[in-house]
Amino acid sequence: MTAAAHDLVLFDLDGTLTDPMEGFVRSMNFALTHFGYEPVETQDLAAYVGPPIDEAFRTITGKDTAPEINALIAKYRERYNEVGFSENVVYNGVPEALDGLSAADVPMAVCTSKRQDFAEKVLALFGLRQHFRFVSGGDVGIHKWQQMESLRMEKKVSESSIMVGDRAVDMIAAHRNGLKAAGVLWGYGSRAELSGEAPLHLFQSPGELQRLAGGSPQ
């Protein structure tokens, strides 16, 4: 095995390691209907998987005041914390891919827009937490590029690190902070969305993640 090309592989969570759709949709509609909005169909909510949740509620409701948006987020999190996190599904091949990278001594971490405590619960649910040095979670009003900027300031990531995610926001955050980026096609971003941000890699299946260890894809 050749030496790893990156000092850290930084993974997105939703749409990259796990599929959050069921818990996300049910928790979103739990919040929306509580405040008198019509529920949104699953296919129409897919576009909101990944970016910060406050942006999703602003777009869906047309509201933009902090009290209204924060109330929706609080109601969403109420259900998500109780049951929504457990409705995640780990993508086929992801546990094996992480096992392979760990066996090759590839340093890994997670950077997600999801709140850190929720991300930790999801990773623990699937027995994946031990693979990662740290978990960076987001919060309302914090963009992913800002999360990554903080990680760079803390020297947890460097220009030799690579961000792996399924949405353009992951690629943009990485490039804005001087990191490499890799897109995955099994999540919620299209090939066009990801290709438009010029990622170093574009993986079609979790088995191809082994390339990050300097080996051949499975």
Image (spheres, rainbow, N blue to C red):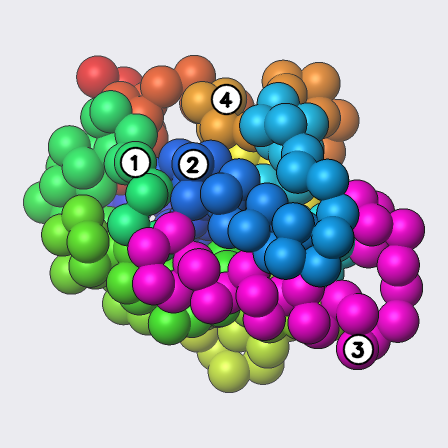
Q: Provide the secondary structure element on which disc 4 rests.
A: loop
**Residue named by callout 4:** 185
Q: Magenta part mainly helix, strand or loop?
A: helix
Q: Does the magenta stretch include residue 122?
A: no
- On the image, which quarter does residue 144 sit in? bottom right
Q: Provide the secondary structure element on which disc 1 rests.
A: strand
* Distance Cα–Cα, label 4 vs label 2: 19 Å
In this rendering, position of residue 95 left or right of residue 214 = left
* Distance Cα–Cα, label 2 vs label 3: 26 Å
Q: Do the residues labelled 4 and 3 touch (CB within 8 Å)?
A: no
Q: Provide the secondary structure element on which disc 3 rests.
A: helix
* Distance Cα–Cα, label 4 vs label 1: 16 Å
Out of 71 and 64, give the one closest to the viewer: 71
Q: Are marks 1 and 2 in contact (CB under 8 Å)?
A: yes
Nearer to us of marks 4 and 1 is 1
The amino acid type, in three-letter code, at marker 4 is Leu
Q: Residue 22 carries which label?
A: 2
The image shows residue 98 at horizontal and vertical percentages of: 21, 41
**Residue named by callout 1:** 89
Q: Provide the secondary structure element on which disc 2 rests.
A: helix
Please tell me which residue is depicted at 82% across the width and 55% down the height of the picture.
Answer: 58
Task: Return the disc, 4 or 3, that comes first in the chain's sequence.
Answer: 3
Task: Return the disc, 2 or 3, that comes first in the chain's sequence.
Answer: 2
Out of 182 and 2, give the one closest to the viewer: 182
**Residue named by callout 3:** 67
The image shows residue 95 at horizontal and vertical percentages of: 18, 37
Please tell me which residue is depicted at 55% across the width and 60% down the height of the picture.
Answer: 76
- Res 30 visible: yes
The image shows residue 18 at horizontal and vertical percentages of: 35, 39
Q: Residue 19 carries which label?
A: none
- On the image, which quarter does residue 192 sit in? top right
